[in-house]
Image (tube, grey):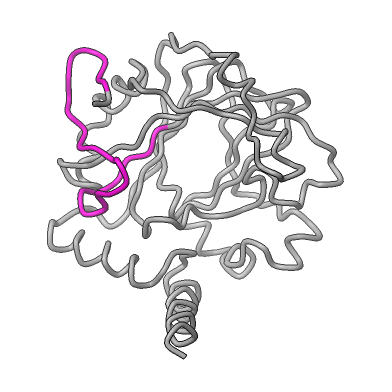
Amino acid sequence: MFSKLKSFIISMDYLFANVFLYSQSRAYEVLKDCVYAKVRRLKKEFNLENGSVNKSLSINEKELSIRNRSNSEFAQYSSGYTIEQIPREFVEIISNHRDTIEKYLGSDFLFGKPLVFRNYNFDLKFRCYDIYSNIWHQDSHDGNRILKIFILLHHTSDEHGPFHYLNFKDVKRHWSILRNRWSFPNMKRLPIFEEQMKITGEAGDYVILDTSRCSHRASIPSDFRDMAAITLYPNWRKKNGRQPYVYSSRTDKLS
């Protein structure tokens, strides 16, 4: 009986956030972020940031070749690996946007291990299947106040299956469509929005956005597409090996 009651409460928690807070996270976590942000006088929303840095990060093909060994029939269509050292590109981007990042997450924000990932081509008939986050969604694992930095690792155009995203204002406008990641209508037809943006350009081009609020998705490359990403969290989210970010003139290392 207790387990059923617990499941019911958690379900209602998600439902409340979905209906009233434009979020796929738990209402408890969203409200927690709201309270902490208000107490610490942080900005309510984060405006999208983008730019370009000189790319020196290279792909480790050996690491990418170690594919996901799960039983999923779709595991072969994406691969990736974490990096034990923060690449210079991320250090430079965080330094260049220090003020806006700290006003949103606090000066003592945390970071997770950087990730390099590659998405491969798959048959278009599966485009509405959630194979490698290629349908619209929010990152719902940690409330609704996180930042993710994405960097292109090679020239990326429409044929490379670019990353698509919406700003939060447009998410709210289209929430009736976006609210349910795995709704039957969305599984039949991939929604296309006039306002949607995409990360295309040259190696070193980047975007910073709150992926817990800004709905986003991958798209299907004609061959493959490589990107690197790092996720930043407010300090009250500290757990699971995330560490405080320390500014340095050199490339930072994970301990």
Answer above or below: position of 217 versus 205.
below
> In front here: 208 or 140?
140
In magenta, the rendered stretch is 230-253
The spot of residue 115 in percent (x, y) is 46, 29
Residue in view at x 66 percent, y 51 percent: 135
Would residue 67 be found to the left or right of residue 9 on screen?
right
The quadrant of the picture occupied by the C terminus is top left
Q: In this view, does 176 lie above or below 231?
A: below
**Image x and y of residue 60, in percent:** 54, 14
Count of marks, rendered view: 0
Q: Residue furthest bottom?
A: 1
Q: Is residue 55 left or right of residue 38?
A: right
Q: Is residue 250 magenta?
A: yes
194 magenta-colored? no
Image-quadrant location for residue 219:
top right
**Closer to the camera, 122 or 163?**
122
Q: Is residue 47 left or right of residue 109?
A: right
Q: Which of the two residues, 176 or 10, is positioned nearer the viewer here?
A: 10
> At x 52% / y 57%, what residue is drawn?
170
Residue visible at 62% across and 30% down in the picture:
79
